[in-house]
Image (cartoon, helix red, strand yellow):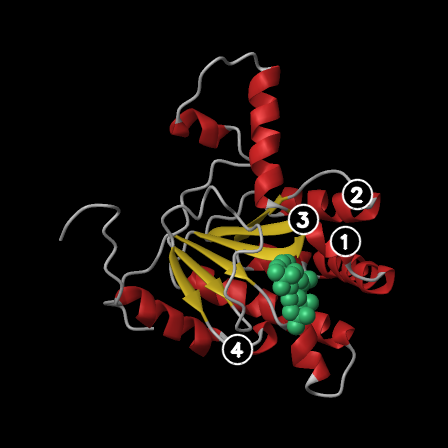
């Protein structure tokens, strides 16, 4: 990547289109999820190697439980096995993995696979890979409000409120959604407040380092004003 380019601090990706990627190849949707997971591994390393400090990815939404039991089970098994098998991949590349998730509904083995991956990668300094799994932006905000009530806090401002979110991450600079859908689907609603949005028709399993470079080129052409005047 051209070293003159501005690199966003926090990138978020709604990794969408795994199912259609597979169906267009005459494969089962599950094969698309396999390909998506494989891509996530190498792409996250590439993105954090470019100097991005935090990469948040939407791997499974609270709403994705509406899918068939077979598909949900397949995805949960993929997460459990993937997180176990790829531990060394992230440790060796110095990546710190964290998870944003809504606790209820998740299987114990999924929670323990997430816990172990977080624990073993906790000293990674290259960058943070934040995997949002059983995540919903509205639930994150409501969870924060409930913690505030429990703490007996009577008044909050934006800075204090952020501290009650799953983790106090920096605001998202660039949000990418693959597969041609033009919506947020309840992704990080608070953190997306002033993000640049980039939509591509490419399905996630094909969204590789070259596709990411194109998103960075587009980001570099944006004029971020944050309400000011240029
Ligand atoms: C994204 O791909 C992965 C998850 C939501 C788990 P999809 O499974 O949504 O793929 P499409 O959108 O049906 O093609
Ligand atoms: C959003 O994708 C959630 C994830 C990528 C995990 P979906 O495929 O579930 O979103 P909708 O249903 O098309 O909005
Ligand atoms: Mg989808």
Q: Which of 83 and 120 is in front in this view?
A: 83
As helix, strand or loop, the secondary structure at mark 2 comes to loop
Of labels 1 and 2, earlier in sequence is 1
Task: Identify the residue under disc 4.
Answer: 202
Q: Nearer the viewer, residue 72 or 78?
A: 72
As helix, strand or loop, the secondary structure at mark 3 comes to helix
Task: Identify the residue under disc 1.
Answer: 65
Quadrant including the N terminus: bottom left
Q: Which of 170 and 141 is in front in this view?
A: 141
Of labels 2 and 3, earlier in sequence is 2
User: In the displayed structure, does residue 30 sit left or right of residue 133?
Assistant: right
Badge 3 vs badge 4, beta-carbon distance below 8 Å = no
Instruction: Give the alpha-carbon distance from disc 3 to disc 4, as whole Å.
Output: 29 Å
Q: Position of residue 129 (x, y in %)?
A: 54, 53
As helix, strand or loop, the secondary structure at mark 1 comes to helix
Badge 4 vs badge 2, beta-carbon distance below 8 Å = no
Q: Position of residue 63 (x, y in %)?
A: 70, 52
| Ligand 2 within 8 angstroms of badge 2 C-beta | no
Dot 1, crowdedness within 10 Å: few (<14), some or many (≥20)? some
Instruction: Give the alpha-carbon distance from disc 4 to disc 2, as whole Å.
Output: 31 Å
Dot 2, crowdedness within 10 Å: few (<14), some or many (≥20)? few
Instruction: Give the alpha-carbon distance from disc 1 to disc 4, as whole Å.
Output: 24 Å
Badge 1 vs badge 2, beta-carbon distance below 8 Å = yes
| Ligand 1 within 8 angstroms of badge 4 C-beta | no
* Marker disc for residue 105: 2
């Amino acid at each position: 990547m051209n070293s003159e380019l501005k690199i966003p601090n926090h990138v978020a990706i709604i990794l969408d289109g795994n199912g259609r990627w597979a169906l267009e190849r005459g494969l089962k949707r599950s094969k698309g999820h396999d390909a998506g997971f494989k891509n996530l591994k190498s792409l996250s390393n590439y993105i954090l190697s470019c100097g991005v400090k935090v990469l948040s990815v939407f791997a499974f939404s609270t709403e994705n439980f509406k899918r068939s039991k077979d598909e949900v089970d397949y995805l949960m098994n993929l997460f459990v096995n993937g997180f176990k098998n790829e531990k060394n991949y992230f440790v060796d590349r110095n990546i710190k993995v964290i998870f944003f998730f809504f606790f209820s509904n998740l299987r114990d083995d999924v929670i323990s696979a997430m816990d172990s991956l977080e624990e073993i990668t906790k000293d990674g300094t290259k960058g943070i890979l934040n995997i949002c799994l059983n995540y919903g932006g509205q639930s994150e905000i409501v969870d924060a409000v409930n913690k505030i009530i429990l703490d007996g806090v009577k008044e909050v401002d934006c800075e204090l409120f952020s501290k009650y979110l799953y983790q106090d991450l920096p605001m998202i600079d660039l949000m990418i959604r693959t597969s041609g859908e033009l919506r947020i689907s309840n992704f990080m609603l608070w953190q997306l407040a002033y993000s640049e949005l980039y939509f591509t028709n490419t399905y996630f399993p094909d969204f590789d380092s070259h596709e990411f470079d194109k998103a960075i080129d587009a980001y570099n052409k944006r004029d971020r004003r944050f309400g000011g005047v240029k």
